[in-house]
Image (cartoon, helix red, strand yellow):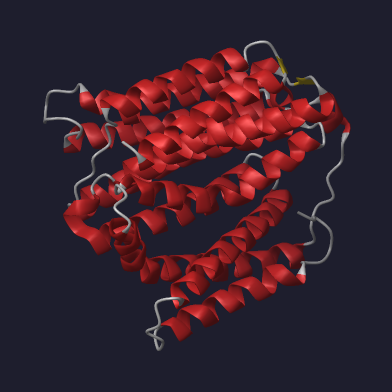
Amino acid sequence: MSSTGKIPVWTILLPVLAWIVFIIGHYINWPPFIIVSAASLIAAVLSAVHHAETIAHRVGEPFGTLVLALAVTLIEVSLIVSLMFAGGQDTSVLARDTVFAAVMIILNGMVGLSLFAGGMRFREQNFTLQGISSALTILVTISVVTLILPNFTTSVPGPFYSKQQLLFVAIVTLVLYGIFILVQNVRHRDHFLSSEEKDATIETPTTMVAGLSVLLLILCLGAVVFLAESLAPGLEAWVKSIGAPVSLVGVIIAMVVLLPEGLSAYHAARKNQLQKSLNLSLGSALASIGLTIPAVSLVSLYTGLPLSLGISSGSMVLFLTTLFVIILSLSTGKTTILQGAVLLIIFAIYIFSIIFP
């Protein structure tokens, strides 16, 4: 992402093309056109994240991080809510599956691939332990409260929270995420920066560039929301037609949303910037669960749509294994290909267990 005085042409063309595809889709009843719509959706997501990053550089921290997190969360929530309204009662587990998939993809897939790629190229990589430990502390707490605890509450049968519990958990989750943003960007910012990043200077975009990015971000998010709504029935029908479980829909949504940050994290690790790579990955996980769950919870409370949060016993075992391994892997401040390989294998087990439950 460039923070100079101009905006790349592709970030202007992609949202325009996405809107054109959405409009054409209303007049074309041709099944293969869904592929074009899906590609346009991904393109709009990539462009949206770029413009959110431009705005983030302009407004500075901690507001910059919030702008990017809110933009990505809005994309994820719009995809989830579109599918929830399209499927009704049958999609009560969609938010849970998407958030769980996002966390598993990030902790095992994104982090695993980054550690493995970085280890292959540089043998051993270093990062600041205090910042990563802080992120993991918040992530473990939020994850357990939102995805595991609902199975063991007694006010209503699990894996559901009662309305009072759901509202309380939404508030607690937002508070924990807010504390993390405060620590990361204000109180202990140096804990999340490598020595090279502390000395680096970032060129701030001009007011005109930032203003144009705001307009283009709105254009991108609008395209994402409407394309998601148009793709919702086709995506669910395709998943059912191949005999796959409904949780695969959540995995697909999570992969689309995490694509830009996943690529950024991988490229950072390949440049021996592991601190930046881990910040992107764990920050994505925290934003995904720390903002998406409260947003979807409020939608559920307002609309009356059921929201199942507790994961199954099999998923719980795999999830707790992931949390245990990621804590051990990032407990020394140094990593090699070993940690990356183990996380990638857990990710492969996760995908395999979805396809062949």
Q: Residue at x 23, y 60 (%)?
A: 87
Q: Which image quarter holds the C terminus?
A: top left
- Rendered location of residue 143, percent (x, y): 40, 27
Q: Residue at x 47, y 35 (%)?
A: 103
In which image quadrant can residue 211 be found?
Answer: bottom right
- Rendered location of residue 139, percent (x, y): 48, 26
Q: Residue at x 36, y 29 (%)?
A: 172
Q: Nearer the viewer, residue 162 or 211?
A: 162
Q: Nearer the viewer, residue 193 or 223?
A: 223
Q: Is residue 186 left or right of residue 148?
A: right
In which image quadrant can residue 341 be found?
Answer: top right
Please tell me whether residue 63 is drawn above or below residue 82 in the rendered image: above
Q: Nearer the viewer, residue 137 or 334?
A: 334
Q: Is residue 246 left or right of residue 101?
A: left
Q: Residue at x 35, y 21 (%)?
A: 317
> Is residue 294 in view from this perspective?
no
- Rendered location of residue 49, percent (x, y): 62, 55
> Is residue 74 in view from this perspective?
yes
Please tell me whether residue 153 is drawn above or below residue 289 in the rendered image: above
